[in-house]
């Protein structure tokens, strides 16, 4: 079954799974945009997703076609996410840390 057939399932690489297991809201946010994003054939193969935490603990989640080619942006009212930013790749339906690519 592909992600396009069942968008409730977003496979992740093992390293990312351990790292994010308590941050399922972030996985849910990325997965929630896939029905819209996957209408673009170029985004079915590769996407960049970046979470940026602001000093006031608000955050911005951005999904991009390529660096600085924004497709979707979501403002998040509050997070206690430990890092200031993190970037993911979604490659052929598999979400991974950049170091896992």
Image (cartoon, grey):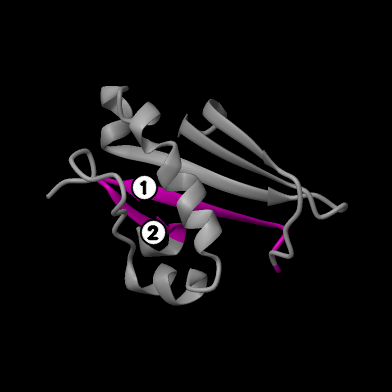
Q: Secondary structure at mark 2?
A: strand
Q: Do tag 2 and tag 1 residues touch (Cβ < 8 Å)?
A: yes
Mark 1 neighbour density, 10 Å: few (under 14) some (14–19) many (20 or more): many
84 lies left or right of 26: right
Residue 6 in picture, x, y percent from top left: 22, 45
Which residue occupies 39% across, 39% down?
47
Q: Which residue is mark 1?
A: 90
Main secondary structure of the magenta stretch: strand
Quadrant for residue 100, please give it: bottom left
Residue 63 in picture, x, y percent from top left: 50, 37
Q: Nearer the viewer, residue 25 or 42?
A: 25
Q: Which mark is residue 30?
A: none
Q: Nearer the viewer, residue 63 or 76?
A: 76
Residue 34 in picture, x, y percent from top left: 37, 37
- Looking at the rendering, the stretch of residues picked out in magenta corresponds to 82-98
Q: Which mark is residue 96?
A: 2
Which residue occupies 75% across, 46% down?
77
Q: How many marks?
A: 2
């Amino acid at each position: 079954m592909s992600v396009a057939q069942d968008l409730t399932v977003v496979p992740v690489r093992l390293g990312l799974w351990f790292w994010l297991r308590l941050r399922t809201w972030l996985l849910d946010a990325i997965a929630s945009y896939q029905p819209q994003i996957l209408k673009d054939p170029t985004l079915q193969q590769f996407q960049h997703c970046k979470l940026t935490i602001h000093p006031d603990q608000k955050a911005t989640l951005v999904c991009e076609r390529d660096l600085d080619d924004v497709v979707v942006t979501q403002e998040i009212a509050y997070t206690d996410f430990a890092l200031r930013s993190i970037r993911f790749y979604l490659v052929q339906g598999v979400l991974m840390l950049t170091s896992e690519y």
